[in-house]
Amino acid sequence: MNDLIRPKRIVLGITASIAAYKAADLASKLVKSGVDVYPVLTAEAARFVGPATFTALTGHPCPIDTFDEPFPGEIAHIWLARNCDLIAIVPASMNCIARLAHGLADDMLTATVMATAAPILLAPAMNTGMWNNPATQANLETLSKYGYQFIEPVTGMLACRTEGVGKMADVVTIEAAIQSVLRGSQPLSGKHVLITTGPTREPIDPVRYLTNRSSGKMGYALAETARRLGAAVTLISGPTALPAPIGVQTIPVETAREMMNAVQAHVQTANIIIAAAAVADYRPETISPQKIKKNGSAPTIALVENEDILAWIGKSKRPDQTLVGFAAESENLLANANKKLQGKNLDWIVANDITAAGAGFDADTNIATLISRDGAQTPLPKMSKREMAERILVAVSPIPPAL
Ligand code: CTP
């Protein structure tokens, strides 16, 4: 896989402190957010928490000794050192800080740290006296000169039942610091991606509405992928059964008009705009305030056309904004998609044949052709919507193609 877009990979080092149990919560949070976590314990830390906990949470072996070799055909500390995007040591004990400051490499964790070129983040945790000890302060200064980054400990109740500085920063703060280092090195960091998704619901009366079969899955996959690649993401979503993706600004809307208002409120800052929503083309001209009752003859519902949100963006967009539309077609796929590309002033269109097996509404997979403004066509054969999201984002953004 393109090394720039694979999930971020970190080595999570855990050293001896009572705060070691909090590293399990951190590992779980990081994994849930899509980070690939490789745990490494020190022998002393393993007296506080066991490797089985971290293996279960991360799905990876948790080596301790330098000669533990859990990756067949690889020298573990070198492989970890070369293939991670960050080493975070949580908690970092006084002893660990001293060993790193003096260049010791006598277990798996320190050997990995010594061999890496990745950024290193330490979350110290220790007794106040140990923290204030001039040896610790000198070691911290040395490490800081070497480029190590720190998440400062806070003042609070310590394991030794005294109050003072040395308590490890809370897990939420540490996770945010880790995510921020990872984002800084990500291909879409600094970019704002705006995505519309899902169906819209156009009410007829208090119980009935017009809608369509969109599940929103493609738009959610795009939002999760864009966030994983470092972008700030705004997801404007019609009603779906999907949970709001972690770390994405999700704005729920019901009608096409609500979707348009939300788009207009967020489009200015967007660098990439992707319209994956299946917006209802028409809405009832009037909404009956009361439930429409049966009275022997079928009612006639007059419809009016909804404004085309994508066409509105196409008319008002700046040249520095990239606009991507979708075309859901049941016939003349490429001709119809090209017409929408030109007619709505798009930079790219994802043409979907909704009649193909494994494509279109509610499926977990999709089949499409990506067409650029200059007419170049890239077929995207049957693949998961997540994979397709990655292919689309790589094509429409300045991410270099696979290395
Ligand atoms: N779209 C939109 N607002 C609308 C209608 C469509 O933003 N009121 C966007 C969709 O999100 C999609 C693209 O326009 O990115 C094409 O949508 P589609 O339903 O395929 O086409 P329409 O333009 O509605 O044309 P038709 O229904 O005739 O195929």
Image (tube, rainbow, N blue to C red):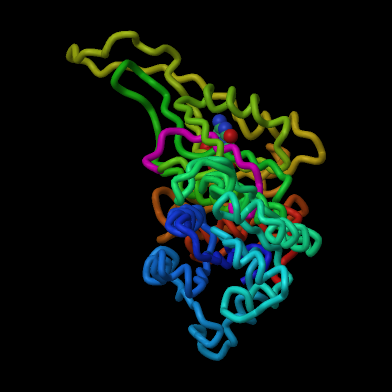
Quadrant position of ligand 1: top right
The residue closer to the viewer here, 171 or 229, is 171
As drawn, the residue found furthest toward the top would be 289
Where in the figure is residue 161, as x and y percent of width and height? 44, 46
Where in the figure is residue 239, as x and y percent of width and height? 41, 34
Residue at x 68% of width, y 41% of height = 192
Where in the figure is residue 234, as x and y percent of width and height? 59, 37
For the N terminus, the quadrant is bottom right
Residue at x 63% of width, y 58% of height = 122
The residue closer to the viewer here, 198 or 350, is 198
Residue 350 in the image: above or below residue 84 = above
Is 235 in the magenta? Answer: yes
Residue at x 52% of width, y 65% of height = 14
Which residues make up the magenta segment? 228-242
Where in the figure is residue 129, as x and y percent of width and height? 60, 52
Is residue 144 visible in the rendered structure shown here?
Answer: yes
Residue 62 in the image: above or below residue 310 = below
Is residue 359 visible in the rendered structure shown here?
Answer: no
Residue 182 in the image: above or below residue 317 = below
**Left or right side of 148 for 152:** left
The residue closer to the viewer here, 360 or 262, is 262
Number of numbered callouts drawn: 0
Is 108 in the magenta? Answer: no
The residue closer to the viewer here, 159 or 336, is 159
For the C terminus, the quadrant is bottom right
As drawn, the residue found furthest toward the bottom would be 73
